[in-house]
Amino acid sequence: MGLLTDSFFIQALESNEPLVAMLPAHGFYNNVAYPEEDMDNAELPYIIVNNDGGSNQGTSKDNMYEGPIDMVNISIAIVGRNREELNEMAVAVRQTIHQYVIEAHRRFYANEMIEGDELCPNDYNFSFSEIAYDMMKPAVKVVLNYECETDSDL
């Protein structure tokens, strides 16, 4: 259904040891456990992975059944001290997710799946936000957006 798709993204990011080492808390936050207001005093840099909901591709007023594909929106907010650090982390996140999806698909077709591979999106579209500046920290932020095609489990 895609409710756990963000867990796949966190698993992918945790597999990149140099990226994990860049973060003071050595981990990735999820908005469910760490709402944005609690992140105001978080040590920089940090990354928040969030499941922003989704929709079913087959649902319409003319169709009495839901389709087999859900579209799930995952956002990854990256907050750094400066634009150089932000760029380094954004590139690492984007490359890591791309490679992890490719590897999960390879394991699937080779019948060598590992725990968490079942949460891998079938496909995804990528976009990113403008760079925002928070002068209260100070910090810079960009949000990477993934629109993921997943099985609806119906």
Image: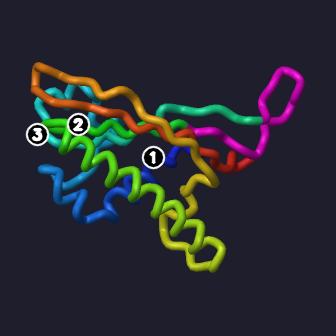
Residues at marks 1 and 3, CA–CA distance in whole angstroms: 22 Å
Kindly identify the amino acid type of the residue bearing the numbered disc 2. Val
Check residue 66 for magenta coloring: yes
Circle 3 residue: 43
Kindly identify the amino acid type of the residue bearing the numbered disc 1. Asp
Above or below, 124 against 134 in this view is below
Give residue 75's position: percent from left, percent from top: 42, 37
Sooner in the amino-acid sequence: mark 2 or mark 3 = 3
Q: Secondary structure at mark 3?
A: loop
| Number of residue marks | 3
Quadrant position of residue 50? top left
> Are dots 1 and 3 in contact, CB under 8 Å?
no
Question: Which residue: 54% across, 56% down?
Answer: 119
In the displayed structure image, the side of residue 128 where residue 58 appears, left or right: right
Q: Secondary structure at mark 2?
A: strand
Question: Which residue: 43% across, 52% down?
Answer: 9
Quadrant position of residue 18? bottom left
Give residue 144's position: percent from left, percent from top: 40, 38
User: What stretch of residues is rendered in magenta?
Assistant: 58-72
Q: Tag 1: Cα neighbours inside 10 Å, few (<14), some, or many (≥20)?
A: many
Sooner in the amino-acid sequence: mark 1 or mark 3 = 1
Residues at marks 2 and 3, CA–CA distance in whole angstroms: 10 Å
Circle 1 residue: 6
Give residue 85's position: percent from left, percent from top: 18, 44
Circle 2 residue: 79
In the displayed structure image, the side of residue 56 where residue 108 appears, left or right: left
Above or below, 53 against 95 in this view is above
Sooner in the amino-acid sequence: mark 1 or mark 2 = 1
